Image (cartoon, rainbow, N blue to C red):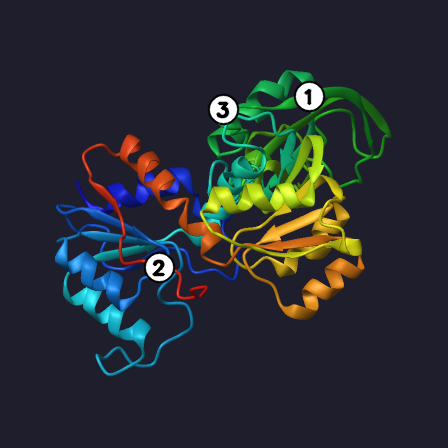
Amino acid sequence: MRVSDLIATIESLAPPHLAEEWDNVGLIIGSASSPLLGPVLLTIDLTEQVADEAVRKKCSAVIAYHPPLFAPIKRLTDTSGVAERVALRMARDGIAVYSPHTALDAAMGGVTDWLADGLAGGKGAAGGDRRAIRPQAIRHANQEVKIVTFVPESALDMVRDGLATAGAGLIGAYERCSFSSPGTGTFMGNAGSRPAIGRPGKFEAAPELRLEMVCSRRTLALAVMTLKQFHPYEEPAIDIYPLEPRPDRAVGVGRRLWLDHPIALAEVAQRLKKHIGVSAVHIAAAGENPQKQVSCIGIVPGSGGSLVKEALGVECDVFITGEMKHHDVLAAVASGLSVILGGHTATERGYLPVFAKLLAKKLPAAKFLVSAADKDPLVAR
């Protein structure tokens, strides 16, 4: 078993394409080909204390939810900053480090869904409708464009099969996928033309089939060349349409949880405290009424202030995240959106045992440990 097996398992649960563009997810330190002999340690932050723990427990890899290296670095020495020192130590001790971060937030069953489970009344509770605040738009590699041509019925199979050999018509587990519809094509060739139907200089109308097939941009040039080779016409008509990515409401940034029955804002806060295991949260109640009934909850783990406008746009009554800027809270409340802040890592850390179990189920040959040294740096006194 190698680090590559661990990466494949993580990415089956948190596909990297779900991550935000600004993020730094993936293998941060180490080699995918390295053997995975020791335990895998899960942590929110890869601090020096967590690094000590990983070395002490003879770990082969660390899954650090927050990327330990984010901004560009100029030096990697033991006298550099904390991030550089930790990275150097992990590399020196042969411990691979992988960060799933926002990919794990956006994934179905990830950090955000874990938070939503607790606010809905527990996993499996009838919590009402749930969807991403900003659904992830997914463009499948083989469906980036649609190539369209017009052929006589007698040539349909030949052209479709030719396009298929060039990589067109792939949809999931299916090949040679196409659609054809009948119509009438018209044309008139000039004196130098060699039409397959009719004569030069004569206006022609011919029954044709419109043939449509999806295609990747990577194979588009080959598909066009192949189409021309197999098409019976001297100058076949070819249309190419870019395809928009398709949004998936089950994955993406944040969650909008619409409750089956309204509950008081104070009850939402109680559910959050119980679920993430804290004694207190911060509440900013719109209208200064903590007993106000709410039906729609916006949820973003960590720091979610940038999603406030989008939460308002999907009719949320209350917005739950870890931390927000003071003036962003004021603006949200002024717009009628109550805010509950549970603490940045407090809204994330409770998911680690859940993630460890999911990983162990998929990769039973590996041992997964949740860090005991990983703690919230902010402590209420």
**Mark with earlier residue (1, 3):** 3
Q: Quadrant of residue 149?
A: top right
Residue labelled with disc 3 = 175
**Mark with earlier residue (3, 2):** 3
- Residue 110, image x, y percentages: 46, 41
Q: Which of 237 and 325 is in front in this view?
A: 325
Q: Element under label 3?
A: loop
Foreground disc of the pair 1, 3: 3
- Residue at horizontal 63%, vertical 34%? 130
Do residues under tags 1 and 3 come within 8 Å of each other at their CB atoms? no
Q: Label 2 is placed on what type of residue?
A: Lys
311 displayed left or right of 281: right
Do residues under tags 3 and 2 come within 8 Å of each other at their CB atoms? no
Q: How crowded is mark 3: few (under 14 residues within 10 Å), some or many (20 or more)?
A: few
- Residue at horizontal 41%, vertical 56%? 25
- Residue 200, image x, y percentages: 79, 33
Q: Tell me the CA gap for discs 1 and 3.
A: 16 Å
Q: Quadrant of residue 98?
A: bottom left
Query: Dividing the image into 4 quarters, which one contains the N terminus?
Result: top left
- Residue 228, image x, y percentages: 59, 36
**From the viewer's perspective, is residue 327 above or below residue 54?**
below
Foreground disc of the pair 1, 2: 2
Q: Residue furthest top?
A: 154
Question: What is the number of the mark on residue 375?
Answer: 2
Q: Label 1 is placed on what type of residue?
A: Ser
Q: Nearer the viewer, residue 14 or 351?
A: 351
- Residue 220, image x, y percentages: 55, 43
Q: How crowded is mark 1: few (under 14 residues within 10 Å), some or many (20 or more)?
A: some
303 displayed left or right of 40: right
Residue labelled with disc 1 = 180
